Image: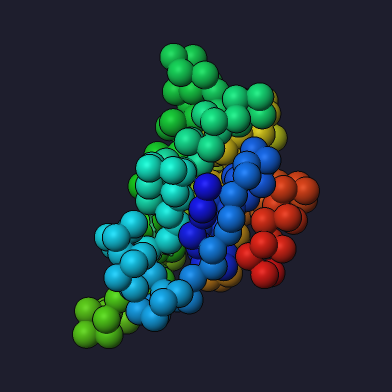
Amino acid sequence: MQLYGMGLSRSFRTLWAAEETGANYDYIELDFGSSGDNGPQSKHYKKLNPQGKVPTLVDGELVICESAAILNYLAAKAPQHNLMPKDGTADRARYDEMCFFILSELEQPLWTTGKHKFAIPEQYRVPEILTKTTAFEFAKAQSALLALKSDRKYAVGEYFTMADILLAQTLGWAQRFEFSIDDSLLEYKERMTKRDAFARAMKKAGK
Ligand SMILES: N[C@@H](CCC(=O)N[C@@H](CS)C(=O)NCC(=O)O)C(=O)O
């Protein structure tokens, strides 16, 4: 398998997941924004990922571009690691709920911040969003997260799953963007990132 990514961006989720599953893969680090040979905007890369974004996982003929889909694919390929609850169980329903919540609610104000700070062309950026909107939206999503996660040790159920990778990476992203984060979530994120697979992924990402 080949995994394309950039630093601690959302691709880091997939790098961490690959390390948790002991997958056999090559990690290819791209240059942010570049259209050169090693850039996400190169012709070659856009054939794999038409948006020119990371991550992308290539497994033979299969090409997958969404970070959460890659997490689930890696978990399904390595069932012995028990990183995704079985289909049709209550734990799986809670796992899906948590993953979709993170992607559609919790990470949105973070990505909006990234877009309006550096990711979209300057003429489309709205500075007021950064001072007025994103902190409010993140605080609202965080309140919902605290209710959803409650005081459990893990994102869902009684054991570590791919949802913990999604959640801990997203909280780390919020920390780097200096959002205000609840102490219990910070403690949770620190605990999740003590895992050996996290340390190996950080090394591969050059961090
Ligand atoms: N929903 C996608 C988002 C992918 C995404 O937006 N990746 C960002 C890095 S976090 C990217 O490659 N941005 C480059 C760009 O927007 O040009 C996922 O979770 O994989």
| Colouring mode (rainbow / by chain / secondary structure / one colour) | rainbow
Left or right of 131 on screen, residue 192: right
In the image, 140 versus 121, the foreground residue is 121
- Residue at 27 percent of width and 81 percent of height: 121
Image quadrant of residue 207? Answer: bottom right
Question: What residue do we see at 49% from left, 70% from top?
Answer: 30
Relative height, residue 168 to residue 71 (above, below): below
**Residue at 38% over, 42% down:** 62
Q: Is residue 78 above or below residue 110?
A: above
Q: Residue furthest front?
A: 60
Residue closer to the observer: 8 or 46: 46
* Residue 164, percent from left and from top: 60, 41
**Residue occupying image coordinates x 45% and y 74%:** 38
Give x and y (percent) for residue 136.
40, 62
Tell me if I can see residue 68 in this picture.
Answer: no
Residue extending furthest toward the left: 123
In-image side of 51 versus 20 (left or right): left
Figure quarter occupied by ligand 1: bottom left
Q: Is residue 22 visible?
A: yes
- Residue 48 is situated, as x and y percent measured from the top left of the image, at 34, 57
Is 183 or 65 nearer to us in this picture?
A: 65
* Image label count: 0
Query: In the image, is residue 4 above or below residue 114?
Result: above
x, y percent for residue 86: 52, 19
